């Protein structure tokens, strides 16, 4: 289990390390997904076949920062 200070430091560090998506350059966002905190591209859901192919070849940023279900931190 992580304390509040550790959680905030991990989140701050992840966001500072990667403010923009590696694939498209859009800003990254942090979101809560159940027991995990995830850093991901803010523009993942672009429509169109060209966007899906580009996303397959160079995936948008999406990484787990904290996973409370397994007590893991990136």
Image (cartoon, rainbow, N blue to C red):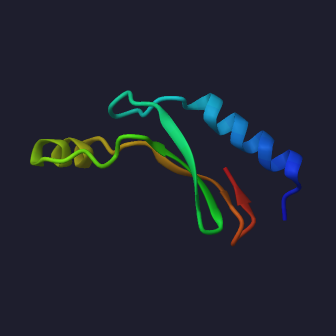
Which residue occupies 88% across, 45% down?
5
Residue nearer the viewer, 54 or 43: 43
Judge left or right: residue 18 versus residue 42: right
Which residue occupies 55% across, 31% down?
18
Extreme residue in the left direction: 49
Residue 18's place in the image compared with 64, above or below, is: above
Residue 11's place in the image compared with 19, above or below, is: below
Residue nearer the viewer, 36 or 70: 36
In the rendered image, residue 31, in percent from the top left (x then y), is placed at 57, 52
Answer with the quarter of the image where residue 21 lies. top left
Which residue occupies 20% across, 41% down?
54
Residue 29's place in the image compared with 19, above or below, is: below
Residue 59's place in the image compared with 21, above or below, is: below
In the rendered image, residue 67, in percent from the top left (x then y), is placed at 66, 62
The quadrant of the rendering that contains the N terminus is bottom right
Which residue occupies 52% across, 50% down?
63
Residue nearer the viewer, 62 or 33: 33
Judge left or right: residue 40 versus residue 34: left
In the rendered image, residue 59, in percent from the top left (x then y), is placed at 33, 45
Judge left or right: residue 39 versus residue 65: left
Judge left or right: residue 24 versus residue 52: right
Answer with the quarter of the image where residue 19 lies. top right
């Amino acid at each position: 289990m992580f304390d509040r200070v550790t959680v905030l430091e991990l989140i701050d560090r992840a966001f500072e390390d990667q403010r923009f998506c590696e694939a498209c350059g859009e800003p990254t966002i942090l979101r809560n997904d159940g027991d995990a905190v995830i850093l991901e591209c803010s523009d993942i859901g672009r429509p169109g076949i060209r966007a899906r192919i580009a996303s397959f070849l160079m995936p948008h940023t999406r990484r787990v920062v904290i996973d409370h279900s397994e007590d893991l931190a990136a």
